[in-house]
Image (cartoon, grey):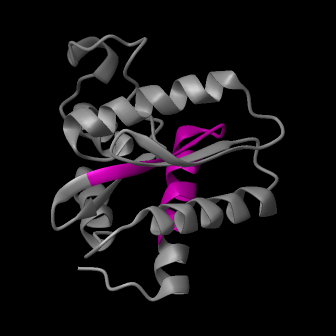
Amino acid sequence: MTTGDYSTKELLQQEIDLTFSTFTNEDAIGVGQELLKLALAEKAPVIVQVRIGEQIIFHSALTGSSSENDWWINRKCRVVEKFKHSSMFVRVSFEENNQSFEEHSGLDNELYAAHGGAFPIITGNGVIGMLAVSGLPQVDDHKMAIKGLLNFKQAKSLKVD
């Protein structure tokens, strides 16, 4: 298993804990900046992206990343759009059922990737956007995404539902 021993219960709790009462374009930029700070501090060869709806609000590609990382981000984000959960949650949910996403989802693997790193932005209106990290092993992509959201929450003292 390449999912860092995550369980769907733990991953669902992350989504609940990181639900926002409101989330604006400026918030998306703030989250993107937090992710960028983390990536720069770790010298991580990643691309970070934050979307609201279909609009890309923040996108940054660091040294060592490539257009292939954009392809991964798009595939991970399609999983969040379809399942309304983090890409890691979707992967682990298949694994907990002794299935592989690639073989059992019925989705085109060129378009969808249930690999850690894409996380839903959730408000009282449901999933309104997502953030994504690509360039590290999937568990590390997921951890960076979560840490960026948590740092943003702490820095801005936003009310989280």
Q: Quadrant of residue 42?
A: bottom right
> Residue at (58%, 59%) from the top-left corner?
32
> Residue at (25%, 76%) from the top-left corner?
21
Q: Quadrant of residue 157?
A: bottom left
> Residue at (33%, 47%) from the top-left corner?
86
- Which residue occupies the foreground of this view, 16 or 77? 77
Any part of residue 5 in sight: no
| Magenta-drawn stretch contains 129 | yes
Q: Quadrant of the N terminus?
A: top left
- Residue 24 position in % (x across, y down): 39, 66
Q: In the rendered view, would you say 46 is above or below 103?
A: below
| Magenta-drawn stretch contains 147 | yes
What segment carries the magenta color? 128-149
Q: In the rendered view, would you say 62 is above or below 75?
A: below
Q: Is residue 35 left or right of residue 62?
A: left
Any part of residue 118 in sight: yes
- Which residue occupies the foreground of this view, 8 or 131? 131
Q: In the rendered view, would you say 90 is above or below 124?
A: above
> Residue at (79%, 63%) from the top-left corner?
41
- Residue 153 position in % (x across, y down): 46, 79
- Residue 70 position in % (x across, y down): 59, 29
Q: Is residue 32 left or right of residue 124?
A: right
Q: Quadrant of the C terminus?
A: bottom left
Image label count: 0
Q: Seen from this angle, which residue lies furthest bottom?
A: 157
Q: Quadrant of residue 89?
A: top left
- Residue 81 position in % (x across, y down): 27, 37
